[in-house]
């Protein structure tokens, strides 16, 4: 009869998500900061444009006052063209107090993106500027001025270009940082995997994992691991009979060979004693105490196999079944105890 068991352990998966995580964090940060700065800049540009259009309307009022008083439309149109064509103005008009339009000026669509500039102006820039024109304390006309989005479009293009450059630089930086992280994190994991493979596959028991800078991977050191394995082997050996044999296959796997078994109950009793022996934490020489979990599977000769390989395979399968049943049982116990604890509270 062969009993096969393995100590419980946790497996980590990290390397595949490092690049993606750094890239997503960098791009998300750039997009959020860029969007926030763009909104702030647009608000500032809106206030500036509003103030600038108001100044342009006042300049038109001062310049065209004489033309409006004498109702000289030609002089008023010439003044509008001279002033509005140099500013970010889409259209401007002078309406007399009687409702008659004295003069008007509209910017011609000289560029292919003129319509886009107008749409941006309607969405972002303030509404039409309406400024009354007074003469000798009497209102003689009204100036209506609409802003143009030429500077706004240029600003947005510059912002988008800057964001693209920042995203490119952030992507390169994230990839560089991810490589550094891979070297500092995944290199110890690779070393650990190589040693584990060498011990489990090639039985190279003298292999040791090099010292790592990560606390989770090198908390107690290799000497503590050796102490745990020795303590486990002794506990198992103390539960066996003189004619039985216990051996370490590699890593955290042990095998027990029981001979002269008279009944199945005798095997169950030995397995129970081994579980009870492992219930106590393992005390290390430096004062640490470690809790170790245990999973056991059994195979019988010749019922479960007539070769050592077949018996080990059957025992390994039985061990995993036992581990699965233990997980189900612990989950049920947690569901049962949780309502009770809540009532006590």
Image (cartoon, rainbow, N blue to C red):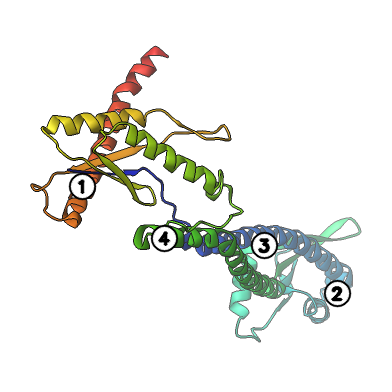
Under circle 2, the secondary element is helix
Q: Verify CB contact (< 8 Å) between mark 3 and mark 1.
A: no
On screen, residue 317 above or below 323: below
Quarter of the image with the C terminus in it: top left
x, y percentage for residue 215?
A: 58, 47
Mark nearer the N terminus (4 vs 3): 3
Most foreground residue, 117 or 174: 174
Q: Is residue 154 visible?
A: yes
| Closer to viewer: mark 2 or mark 1 | 1
Residue in view at x 16 percent, y 55 percent:
310
Q: Earlier in the sequence, mark 4 or mark 2?
A: 2
The x and y percentages for residue 300 are 13, 44
Left or right, residue 181 beside residue 266 = right
Mark 4 and mark 2: Cα distance apart in space: 103 Å
Q: Earlier in the sequence, mark 2 or mark 3?
A: 3
Question: Which mark's residue is nearer the viewer, 1 or 4?
Answer: 4
Q: Which residue is mark 4?
A: 204
Nearest to N terminus: mark 1 or mark 4: 4
Q: Which mark is residue 38?
A: 3
Whole-number angstrom distance, CA of label 2 to CA of label 3: 42 Å
Q: Residue at x 11, y 52 (%)?
A: 305
Query: Residue at (58%, 67%) from the top-left corner?
Result: 179
Quadrant where the N terminus is found in the figure: top left
Q: CA distance from mark 2 to mark 1?
A: 107 Å
Q: Nearer the viewer, mark 4 or mark 2?
A: 4
Q: Label 4, label 3: how many angstroms apart (C-alpha)?
A: 61 Å
- Kindly identify which numbered label has been placed on residue 67: 2
Q: Which mark is residue 315?
A: 1
Task: Please report contact status of discs 4 and 3: CB closer than 8 Å, yes or no.
Answer: no
Q: Residue at x 77, y 80 (%)?
A: 85
């Amino acid at each position: 009869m062969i009993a096969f068991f393995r100590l419980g352990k946790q497996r980590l998966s990290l390397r595949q998500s490092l690049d993606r995580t750094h890239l997503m964090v960098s791009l998300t940060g750039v997009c959020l900061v860029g969007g926030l700065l763009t909104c702030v800049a647009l608000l500032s540009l809106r206030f500036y444009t509003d103030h600038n259009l108001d100044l342009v309307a006042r300049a038109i009022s001062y310049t065209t006052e004489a033309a409006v008083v004498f109702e000289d439309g030609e002089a008023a149109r010439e003044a509008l063209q001279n002033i509005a064509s140099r500013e970010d103005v889409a259209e401007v008009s002078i309406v007399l107090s009687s409702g008659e339009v004295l003069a008007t000026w509209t910017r011609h669509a000289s560029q292919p993106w003129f319509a886009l500039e107008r749409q941006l102006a309607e969405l972002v820039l303030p509404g039409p500027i309406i400024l009354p024109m007074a003469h000798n304390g009497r209102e003689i006309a009204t100036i209506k001025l609409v802003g143009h989005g030429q500077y706004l479009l240029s600003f947005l293009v510059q912002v988008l270009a800057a964001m693209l450059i920042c995203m490119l630089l952030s992507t390169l930086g994230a990839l560089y940082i991810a490589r550094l992280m891979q070297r500092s994190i995944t290199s110890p994991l690779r070393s650990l995997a190589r040693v584990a493979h060498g011990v489990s596959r090639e039985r190279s028991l003298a292999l040791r994992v090099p010292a790592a800078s990560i606390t989770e991977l090198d908390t107690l050191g290799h000497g503590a691991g050796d102490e745990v394995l020795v303590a486990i082997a002794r506990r198992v050996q103390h539960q066996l009979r003189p004619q039985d044999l216990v051996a370490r296959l590699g890593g955290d796997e042990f095998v027990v060979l029981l001979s002269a078994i008279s009944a199945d109950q005798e095997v169950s009793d030995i397995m129970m004693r081994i579980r009870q022996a492992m219930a106590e934490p393992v005390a290390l020489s430096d004062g640490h105490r470690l809790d170790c979990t245990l999973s056991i599977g059994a195979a019988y000769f010749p019922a479960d196999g007539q070769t050592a390989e077949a018996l080990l395979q059957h025992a390994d399968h039985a061990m995993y079944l036992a581990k699965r049943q233990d997980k189900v049982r612990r989950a049920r116990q947690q569901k049962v105890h949780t309502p009770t604890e809540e009532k006590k509270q």
